[in-house]
Image (spheres, rainbow, N blue to C red):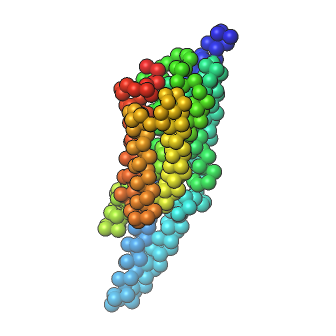
Amino acid sequence: MPEISENLAQWSELFMYLAAVTYMVAFISFAWDIASNSRTTLRLEEAQVRGRELVGAGALSGSAKSARISGIEQGTGERGMSYKRSAAKKIEAHVADADMRYTGARRPAARAAVVILALGAAIHCAGVLSRALAANRVPWGNMYEFCTTGAFLVVLVYLLALTFRDLRFVGVLVSGLALTMMTAATIGFPTPVGQLKPALQSYWLVIHVSIAVLASAIFTITFAMAILQLVQTSRERQIIADQSTKLTRLGFMRLIPSSTALENFSFRLNAVGFVMWTFTLAAGAIWAEKAWGRYWGWDTKEVWTFIIWVVYAAYLHARATRGWSGPPSAWLSIVGYLCIIFNFTVVNVYFSGLHSYSGL
């Protein structure tokens, strides 16, 4: 048995490395899709501008004294209208609508990126399962296992979300974050397979931590969308102020839905994540009573778990009842996710307490 466990641990490490490499390829593919389609929409928008100029030239011809000149310029205006309509129709195929659909767009690089990401998730799943079989327990007993399992769930939640909405525009951030988590696990938190501490040897580890990681994966998606919402809001305001910024400022954002669409979908996902985090908080209190004889003890981990709950509760309340929409809601979502990062990194590694299970 020890030999089998050691072999499984080695296979797990190999799968983790292969998954990280696959995520890197997916990241490059998503980035290439954004870059190539940004160039396409930029050219089409330039065509629209050229069409407006030609239309303007045709309109000016109405006041010309010379009939000959007027006829020539009127033809120029008609040609400009056709040029403008053609460019606008092509742009629509590359830009997501309010439901985050890219009707008519082929985007082969994005499709390939999704396939590669799914392949990476399959390899990653093999690595996580191998780790679990090698340890003969659930694979989230230390920081290494939390990072690797967490990265897998982030990718899995993203792939599942793709079946409901076309979220390929978030692919760069998701694949990049998964790659970062895998790198941090391998370089920063390398931990050999071992047994759990007595307090963790409970079925509540499966319930409490699994829901917490799943909620964190959902909050990761909303964090990425909140960042894009802020950037898109800034771009939309500049476009309203000066139409020329369409051609000069953040052209890749042309491929991303409006800030309102991003905010509405983020709100729904955050609501789901908040319900899971509420269960995490309650399950943690029940587990604490069984392990230490009290439901709440103001341990550092407990405090920060509660702070995260308060931030997301404030976000949902302000967004739903106070009409606190736009950038303020996006910033609240970002603050909530930064608290999650702080809780699962700094608190786990640098703060001593009853929850010091990083394995370092």
Q: Position of residue 209 (x, y in %)?
A: 54, 34
Who's the residue at 37% across and 52% down the image?
331
Who's the residue at 44% across and 52% down the image?
313
Front in this rendered view, residue 252 or 222: 222
Q: Is residue 199 visible?
A: yes
Q: Position of residue 224 (x, y in %)?
A: 45, 47
Relative height, residue 240 to residue 157 (above, below): below
Who's the residue at 35% across and 83% down the image?
60
Choose top left, top right, bottom left or bottom right for residue 200. top right
Choose top left, top right, bottom left or bottom right for residue 301. top left
Q: Is residue 127 visible?
A: no
Choose top left, top right, bottom left or bottom right for residue 206. top right
Who's the residue at 68% across and 10% down the image?
1
Front in this rendered view, residue 335 or 130: 335
Residue sitting farthest toward the left: 241
Q: Is residue 280 shown left or right of residue 45?
A: right
Relative height, residue 342 to residue 35 (above, below): above
Residue sitting farthest toward the front: 293
Front in this rendered view, residue 257 or 145: 145
Q: Position of residue 344 (x, y in %)?
A: 43, 33
| Quadrant placement of the C terminus | top left
Q: Is residue 1 shown left or right of residue 192?
A: right
Front in this rendered view, residue 230 or 295: 295
Residue sitting farthest toward the top: 3
Tally of numbered discs: 0
Q: Is residue 213 shown left or right of residue 247?
A: right
